[in-house]
Image: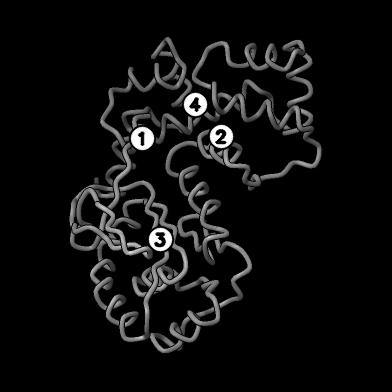
Amino acid sequence: MDSEFFTLSVDGRPVRLADRTLFSVDGAVTDERAYSFIWLPAFLAENDQQFTAGMSQAATLHPWLRKQHALGATIAASGAAMLLLAGSGLTQDMALPLSVPLQIKARKIDPRLRLSQPTDLADRGDIILSPGAAHDAAAVMRGLQRALTHGIGRYLSALYGLPEDEQHESATPQMERAKLLLEQTFASNMAIQMVAERLSISPSAFTRQFRKAFHVSPKAYVQDLRLFSAKTMLERTNRKIDDIAINVGYSDSRLFRMMFKKATGQSAREWRANVQTEKGL
């Protein structure tokens, strides 16, 4: 799926970074786009007065964040940016993993906030909270995985040496690699054969070992990946259904339509209409 990335600021003006350089942005948060994943980076303040002023200015983000969340965006925040999500009312059932200095500031802003020690990510699925720089890369990768495709998320995690969210006790390193390769090649009609050849094992042995490791056949896993990717495109793009079928690996769009209806109980056209109506798109 074609994807675009944008950097935004509250007013569309460049942002001054910690090293005092100016960082140019693509626009302001007032635009009407619906985003799949939003990353709110941590920010610094030289003193309490500057911090309070910054939080006050950033409060204009609250309606925009609520709207994007309602439209289905996954939102991740780091450090002090967690307080923006808290102010938006999007973390009411979550404990914020803030550092001690930020916990003190948070208590002054809202004594009712739930806080926790900053030892790991807090992840609700739609909201991801990072305690700070050491966890930021993992938070971004999780968000990208949910906004784009599972395969992209796993690929980027492997590329940057990050640990996987899912571990399978019975999966050998070879089968973990096979799973990642399937997630990278699922749109090819030859995906299973290609992966077996890459691993220098027969397709039948590959199928047997993969099923033992993940309790699903490679064919069924590929179909799940295609269905997930197709749903993402149907929801977030206006591409023709025949084009989506080709992009996820079906040379015969009639077969894609049949498989989609069998899996969801709805035609692809009906599914798109229903999900976009629910999200107000």
Q: Secondary structure at mark 4?
A: helix
User: What residue type is disc 2 on?
Assistant: Tyr
**In the rendered image, which quarter is residue 118 located in?**
bottom right
- Which residue position holds label 3? 41
- Which residue is pictured at 43% across the width and 43% down the height? 147
Which residue in the protein does label 4 denote?
226
Q: Give the mark nearest the N terminus, 2 or 3.
A: 3
Q: Earlier in the sequence, mark 3 or mark 1?
A: 3
Report the label total: 4
Q: Find numbered disc 2 in the image and state the secondary structure of the residue it sits on.
A: helix
The Cα–Cα distance between marks 2 and 3, rounded to whole angstroms, is 23 Å
- Residue receiving disc 2: 155
Q: Is residue 254 above or below residue 57?
A: above
The CA distance from mark 2 to mark 1 is 28 Å
Q: CA distance from mark 3 to mark 1?
A: 34 Å
Q: Describe the element under mark 1 as helix, strand or loop.
A: helix
10 Å neighbourhood of mark 1: few (<14), some, or many (≥20)?
some
The residue type indicated by label 1 comes to Trp
Helix, strand, or loop for circle 3? loop
> Residue at the location (29% across, 75% down)?
54
